[in-house]
Amino acid sequence: MNSYAALGKGDEQLQERKDDRLEGRTTSAGSSTRLDGWQGKLKAEKSGRSNVKFRTNNSIQPGDGLNEMKARLQVMKFGGTSVGDAACIARTAQIIAKAAKESGCIAVVSAMSGVTNRLIEAAKKAQEGNTGEAATVVDVLRKQHEAALTTLIHHENERARIRRCLEEVLAEGRRLCEGTALLCELTPRTLDAISSLGERLSAPLVAAAVRELGLPSEAIEATELIVTDAFHGGAEPHMELTRAKSQARLRPLLEKRIAPVVTGFIGATAAGQLTTLGRGGSDYSATILGAAMDADEVIIWTDVDGVLTADPRLVAEARTIPVISYREAAELAYFGAKVLHPKTLNPVVQAAIPVWIRNSFAPERPGTKITPEGRSIGGGVKALTAIRDVTLISVGGPGIVGLPDVLGRTFSTTAEVRANVLLISQSSSQNDICFIVATVDAQRTVEALRKEFAQDLAHHKVEHITVDSNVAIVAVVGENMRGTPGIAGKTFNALGRENVNLIAIAQGSSECNISFVIEEQAVKTALITTHREFGLDASPS
C-alpha cells in the first residue's frame, strides 16, 4: 500500500498562488482551501454592497426609511427530474407559487431530465457531419416540450406565445448544429451554446405554469444576470458584476410580486458571450444568485430527501442527515455526492446563507439544512461518499530524485489544462509522484505532462508517466473527526476484515475527512462496511 501524506502544508502553498481561481485544485481531500478562497473574494466585494431596499406591499413606497423592511427572499433551484415532464413541472409551479405568495421567490431551473445529454449527443453527431441525426434529436426535443406545453397551458393565445419562444430556441439549435456539421468542428463555445438550449426551453414552460396558477411570473435567461469569465464548459462568476446586474434586473420584478424563473447552468461574459458553469451547474447558479440578491435561504429541490449518509443505491441503510455543515457538505459534494454540485456552497459561505436540500416529489419532508456550523451527531463521522470515473496518474522513476521542481512543473501543467486534482502523493524515496484526476480530464492531462517532460523522458530522467483508471476514491466525512481519536484505525480495520485493498490514503488539512483509494469493484463493499462500522444506519439523535 502506498502512503499518501496529508496536505496541510501543500494547501498553504497553493493558497499563495496569484491566481486564486486555481485554489483547491491541487489539494488532497480537504475543502478548506476552496471555501476560504471564496470567503476572501466575497468579503472584498461585500464592502462595496449597497443597502437595497425592498418594497413588501403596495402600502410601502421607496424612500419610506425605517418603515421600509426587507421582505424574506428565497432562491429555489429545481433539477432535471423536478421539471422532467408536465406533471413534474406542474408540481414545481405549485411549490414556486406557494413560496411567492408568502415571500419573495426566485426560481432557477434545469433542463428537463435527459435533455442536456441529448443536446450534447446532437452536437457530437453534427461534428461528425451527420446533420440528419442531429436534426432528429432536435425534433424529438420539440415533441417533448410541445407535449408538456399542451398539457400545462390551457389558453391557446398563451400557448401560441410560449410555442414561439420554444421554436426560436430550437431554430437556434438547428443552426448551431448545421454550422458545426459544415466545419466538422465543435468548439467549446459552440458546445456551450448547444448544451444550454435545454434550460432555455424549460424556463418559459415553468414560468407559464406558474402563471396558470394565477401568479405573475417571467422567464429570464441567466445571460442577463450572471457575469463570468470566458472559460467555456466551466466558467467562474464575477460576483461584483453579477450582483449589480442581478439586483438591477430582478429586484424590480420582486417588488411587483413577479416570480422570476431563471435558466440555470448558464451565464455570459462581460461582452455578452454565452458560457456554462459546468455539468450540474444549476445548483451553482442558484447560490450565485442567492449571494448576489442577499437571499435569506437557498433551497435545492431534487428527487431525494436530502443529504444522505451514503448513496442509497449502494447502501440500503443510508438515511437522511437533518443538519450538516458547509464544510461537510462541500467535502461530500467534492467527492462524488450527486445531490450537490461541488462548487455550490462557495458563493454563500461569507454571507452564511443556509442551503436546504429537499425533495420536490415529497415537499412535506424537511430535507437537510446546510449551515456554517452544522450539528454534531456524536462519533465524529457524519457521512460517506465515493467517486468513480477517476484516474491515477504516476510520474516517476529513480531519475527524478534531485530533478529540480518536478512537483511544481507537474501541477502547473495540470492546472493549465484545468484538470481537477483530487489526491496527491509523493513517495518517501521521491521516486514517484502520484495524483488522481477525473477520468474525463486524464487524457489531456497526460498529453500535457508528456509534452512538459519530453526532454526528461528522452534522457530517462523521468522514466514513466502512467495511468490507472480502475480505481475509485471513498471519503469518510465529519466535522468532528478532528476531535475523535481512532477514526482512521476503525476505518482501516473494518476494511481489512473485508479484504478491501487500500491503494492510497490521504487526510485533508481540515481533518474533516479521510480519503482512500481502492479498486473500483470494491466500492460497494467498502461503503457498506464503513457505514456499519460507524453506526450511520442508526436514527439521528
Image (tube, helix red, strand yellow):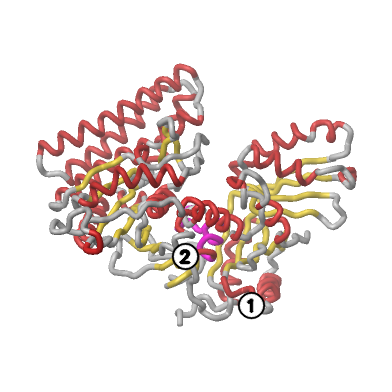
Q: Is residue 443 visible?
A: no
**Which stretch is magenta?**
328-341
Residue 312: assigned label: 2
Amino acid residing under circle 1: Gly
Looking at the picture, how far across and down is residue 225, in whole percent?
A: 36, 42
Amino acid residing under circle 2: Pro
Q: Secondary structure at mark 1?
A: helix
The residue that appears at 46% across and 20% down in the rendered structure is 129
Residue matched to label 1: 483
Q: Does 360 sit left or right of 389 as displayed?
A: left
Marks counted in the figure total 2
Is 134 or 158 nearer to us in this picture? 158
Residue 142: assigned label: none
Estimate how packed mark 1 is, as few (under 14), some (14 to 19) or many (20 or more) residues with alpha carbons within 10 Å: few
Is 538 or 371 nearer to us in this picture? 371
The residue that appears at 48% across and 59% down in the rendered structure is 350
Q: Is residue 160 above or below residue 88?
A: above
The residue that appears at 60% across and 71% down in the rendered structure is 530
The residue that appears at 48% across and 18% down in the rendered structure is 183
Is 536 or 313 nearer to us in this picture? 536
Q: Secondary structure at mark 2?
A: loop
Q: Is residue 332 above or below residue 164?
A: below
Q: Which numbered disc, 1 or 2, marks the residue that appears first in the sequence?
A: 2
Q: Is residue 414 above or below residue 317?
A: above
Q: Quadrant of the N terminus?
A: bottom right
Q: In the current view of this chain or complex, which residue is farthest to the top?
A: 182
Q: Quadrant of the C terminus?
A: bottom left
